[in-house]
Amino acid sequence: MAAKQLNIALVGNPNSGKSSLFNALTGLNQKVGNFPGVTVDKKTGTCQLDDHTTAKIIDLPGTYSLYPRRADEWVAYKVLMKADSDIHPDVILLIADASNLKRNLLFCSQIIDLKYPVVVALTMMDIARKKGYEIDINELERELGVPVIPINPRKNKGIPQVKKALLQTARQQYHAPAFDFIPNKELASFAVDGVKKLVPQLSDYAAVHYLINHESFPLDNLTQKAIEHVEVTNHFNPVKTQADEIVQRYSRIRQIMQQSVVEPDPLQKKLFTEHLDNILLHRVWGYTILLAVLFLLFQSIFWLAQYPMDFIDWSFTKLNSWLSDVLPQVWWSDLLTNGVLAGLSGILVFVPQIMILFGLITILEDTGYMARISFLSDRIMRKVGLNGKSVMPMISGFACAVPAIMSARNIENRKERLLTIMVTPLMSCSARLPVYTILIALVIPNHYYFGFLSAQGLVMMGLYLLGIVMALIVSYVMKWAIRIQEKSFFILELPVYRAPRLEARRHYMIEKAKIFITDAGRVIIIISLLLWFLSSYGPSRRMDAVDAKYAKLEQQATNPEARAIIDRAHKTERLQNSFAGIAGRTIEPVIAPLGFDWKIGIALITSFAAREVFVGTMATLYSVDESDEATLKEKMQNATRADGSKVYTLPTALSLMVFYVLAMQCMSTLAITKRETRSWKLPAIQFAYMTGLAYLMSFIVFHIF
């Protein structure tokens, strides 16, 4: 028998367990792209239903009802209204949260009335039971007229039953209910008849939606005008119709709940979640606990990552030293040790910190605390022109600004969305972490206050807080410049607290490390190789003069110590006269007021491709310049200026850290801002204000210290 593929659309309310079910069904067979024409994530995956049937699962954006407000809700709406030319679902797999069944059944009833083949998967059954709900699945199935399967995707419970129900529904062993959930035709009887004559395949409920939103559907001009005429002739009122529909649906849902659900006594004891929220969302203690959580987050990055980082750094130093001893002194061995290995060490040494940062942030999400951070932050956010929904993109910006800016699509208010996009790059992303780490290690002593407060951790937290504070200040200033008047609402569903899935977190951390190594690593290696060339070669006249000068000096050297000093000076002068050295010297007058030398200038240029390239650049420059026996940290500690003073003093390091907190050193972020705003104007403003702010603040910090 030939294999058959079904198209299954996965739909449901936000936070109902949709992503968990998608992952359980598709496993690793997933792809993420964008829906055609819109910047909204399109997740698809494949699932084997039986030996002969494969299903393509399309995870549609979460929505509360068939009345869309945001761009992602419009995507789901058009697919469900069969107005998307690319996606034609054979079956709808609808996720409903059993612990919030009344609200979830609203969307469910609307889908059923579109006359799709539907399978309902009930999630959060354990939470419903804790809340005191008892659901009669068979009775609920009879009332709705569609299959209802209780599931727990985290424990893989109910997944085989869902697959079986999808197959049976696709084979028409289950039919769409013959009767509407509510009498949709009575909402606008004559108008519905008029639309169905123009578009015969529509259900009564779909015809109501064509009356409301036909301008958004791909209809020819003649049909558009005809539907408009039906509206006018029958005095169709979309607001009244929608209100009547929702009232009738909830009335019918109440009847179903009475028949199939035993609801808890409203005076029963509060759940543990509610007791915990009284503390974590307290107007005083809530913010204190939040600061403590953030402090522990940044302390842990140092506590947990120190030993693996030291081991990786030591391993590369020893490997480099060994290769330098055994390989011949030719150009390709120099390329291998000072180009390839220097670049690789700049990537791998920071993998432990990247993994720990992502792991801890996702644990906060998994436990449900991240949603509480949004709730706590809403009051502050509103004062600067944002709202609580801006917190999630901004916190995501601690990992990477690119997906963080993309996640701002969920903010309905256009002004708040643009403000969020403009300030999110000020959050210290994981690419800045390698820069902070090496500079903090250079100038901040590894001292503990009260036995547990690390000075290095406090400085790290201060850098992250600086980014947050500057983002709020910039947003407050920009809210007067962006002249969009639009009402804003912040509605947030607080999930119950859950134990984090540590096995899933482990996979996630490994996956993020792989992405860092492959994506950032590719850029770092390419730039390291390019830098090796630019640092090793220069205008032939200059380089020949340097070589000739030191050839004479080496002949005059009488002992190994003198030859080593001459060799180090030779390498330094070659680097200064190389292409990279000339470029660094050219921009040095501009950056000298910030305390930066020409090598730091080169790193500022190269790290525009990706901030983490800073460390790879330093590794390459100092490998070309210095001996191979020392680690990068030791080489940077020993670096001196022409007058013999140290390069990396406290003022210089703090100035450089502040510059990296505030500067727009990322091509990818500018590209994604352009894509999300569909304009080069806002990315240009973003680049200009961030670079200017970084220069000003670095100048102030350097001269204060």
Image (tube, grey):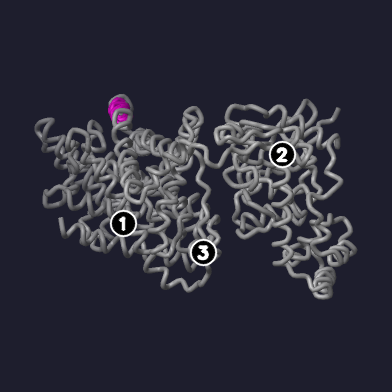
Residue 583: mark in rendering? 1
Residue 379, x across and y down, in percent: 40, 58
Residue 583, x across and y down, in percent: 31, 56
Residue 611, x across and y down, in percent: 37, 49
Label the magenta part by its dominant secondary structure.
Answer: helix
Q: Which residue is mark 2?
A: 120
Gap in angstroms between the C-alphas marked 2 and 3: 33 Å
Residue 488: mark in rendering? 3
User: Camera-side residue: 672 or 454?
Assistant: 454
Labelled pair 1, 2 in contact (Cβ < 8 Å): no
Q: Amino acid at mark 1?
A: Ala
In front: label 1 or label 2: 2
Circle 1: is it few (<14), some (14-19), or many (20+) Cα within 10 Å? some
Which quadrant would the C terminus be assigned to in this image? bottom left
Instruction: Label 1: state its secondary structure.
Output: helix
Instruction: Label 3: state its secondary structure.
Output: loop
Instruction: Label 2: state its secondary structure.
Output: strand
Mark nearer the N terminus (1 vs 2): 2
